[in-house]
Every structure is written in C-alpha cells, then in structure tokens.
Image (spheres, grey):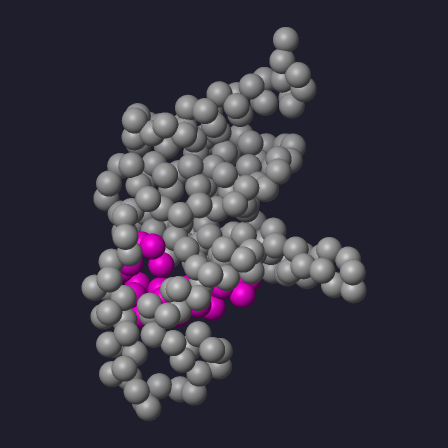
C-alpha cells in the first residue's frame, strides 16, 4: 500500500512525519484476518433486522449483494476471497459494513478485499492482466483499504488486536515496495504489544534488508 494513514489530497501522506520515502520492491503479501474471535452474531442479526425494516422503502438494489442479509453477504465475501476473487468480494463486504458499522470484522475483511484486489490478476485473451485495469483505481483501492484498517483500529481495544493491525499495515507497505515505512509499522506493533510474536521476525528481516540493500549478508 501507499500510506499508513489516509490523508486529504491525492498525494501519499506520511503518518506524523515519522517516515522517509523508501525504495525497492518486495513481493506482495496477502492481507490477513484479525484474530478478534468469532464474528459478533448479534451485530449481524441486527443488520439483517435493519434490512428487513427498510423493506420496500429502500431503493432498488443495483448489485446482488444489496438483496442479501448481512450474514449471507459476509459468507459470500469470504468464499470469493478464498477463491482469489477479491474484487468481486468488495460489494459484499461493503454491504456488511453498511448494515453493521460497529463490527470490526466487517471493516477488516473489507480492507482485505480492497487491498488484495489491487494485486489481483485475471486472464484476458490468454494474458495475465490486473483485475483493475487502471493504476489509478488500484491506488484508490489501496488508500481505501488503509482507511478501513484505521476504522477497524477504532473499534478494537485489545493491545494484541491493535498490534496485529499495525503488522497488517506493515505488510501492505511492503507490498508496495516501502520497507522503511513497513519497518516503522512493525516496530510500532511491537511497542503496542511486546508479546506479539510476528513483529520481531519482521523487524529483523527488514533491518537486514535495509542494511544490505537486499544483497546477501556477510
């Protein structure tokens, strides 16, 4: 991804001025799922009930996801993501967060779908091409993905979960070839939750990468 926090304007902002622009590119990583436990079924049921109350007063649906209850949309989004069809999953997660805006899993999975859609490829006339043909759209999807991570962070209070989100930002920044920014996120993850087991490995790996310029270590 391009930024750690979404800012106004079209350029890629830096969070609190802590980062310098990095160079180099790393292989994209898949966004993960937040270890918050099971989805809060009460919120999903509430979303379904809200959809039913609107009934015929709602505008005609423009996408199959708009005709679904929250639980059904969530399940379809998960299935599409598991099949690597991340761009197709986006409307289903958008439906979920529209009906259950306070459920962190909905925002995280929406972020995941948006982030992965920027890297998704499809075969077109026998040639692998980005699922999003426009680089502008891929950058917009990345910005939106990171904004959803910010929203998810606002909905969690456990340090382990907040630390996990910092790691997700780091992975996203690595995917866009920004190892210095990613390293800052991994260090932040470790400071938020010193018991975080993933952060130290990421920190050591990127410190080595930046020290050697990606070449072999002595």
| Residue 86 visible in the picture | no
Residue in the picture at 59% in, 22% down: 209
Residue in the picture at 30% in, 41% down: 161
Q: Is-magenta flag for residue 99?
A: yes
Q: Is-magenta flag for residue 28?
A: no
Residue in the picture at 27% in, 82% down: 52
Spot occupied by residue 140 in the image (x, y as percentages of width and height): 55, 57
- Which residue appears farthest toward the bottom when viewing the image? 56
Frontmost residue, 17 versus 72: 72
Spot occupied by residue 15 in the image (x, y as percentages of width and height): 44, 40
Spot occupied by residue 1 in the image (x, y as percentages of width and height): 54, 45
Q: As displayed, is residue 84 above or below residue 218?
A: below
Is 90 displayed left or right of 106 in the figure?
A: right
Task: Look at the image and tell me in which quarter the C terminus lies.
Answer: top right
Is 215 displayed left or right of 193 in the figure?
A: right
Q: Give the range drawn in magenta.
A: 87-106
């Amino acid at each position: 991804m391009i930024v750690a926090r979404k800012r106004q304007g079209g350029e890629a902002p830096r969070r609190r001025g802590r980062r310098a622009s990095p160079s180099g590119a790393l292989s994209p990583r898949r966004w993960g799922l937040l270890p918050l436990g099971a989805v809060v079924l009460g919120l999903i049921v509430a979303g379904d009930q809200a959809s039913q109350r609107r009934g015929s007063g709602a505008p005609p649906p423009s996408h199959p996801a708009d005709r679904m209850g929250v639980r059904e949309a969530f399940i379809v989004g998960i299935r599409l993501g598991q099949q690597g069809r991340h761009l197709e999953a986006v409307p289903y997660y958008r439906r979920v967060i529209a009906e259950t805006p306070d459920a962190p899993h909905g925002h995280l999975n929406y972020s995941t779908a948006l982030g992965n859609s920027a890297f998704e490829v499809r075969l077109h006339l026998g040639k692998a091409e980005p699922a999003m043909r426009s680089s502008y759209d891929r950058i917009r999807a990345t910005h939106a993905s990171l904004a959803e991570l910010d929203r998810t962070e606002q909905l969690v209070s456990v340090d382990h979960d907040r630390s996990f989100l910092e790691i997700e930002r780091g992975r996203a920044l690595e995917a866009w070839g920004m190892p210095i920014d990613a390293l800052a996120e991994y260090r932040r993850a470790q400071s938020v939750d010193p018991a975080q087991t993933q952060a130290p490995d990421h920190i050591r790996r990127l410190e080595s990468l930046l020290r050697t310029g990606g070449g072999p270590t002595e």
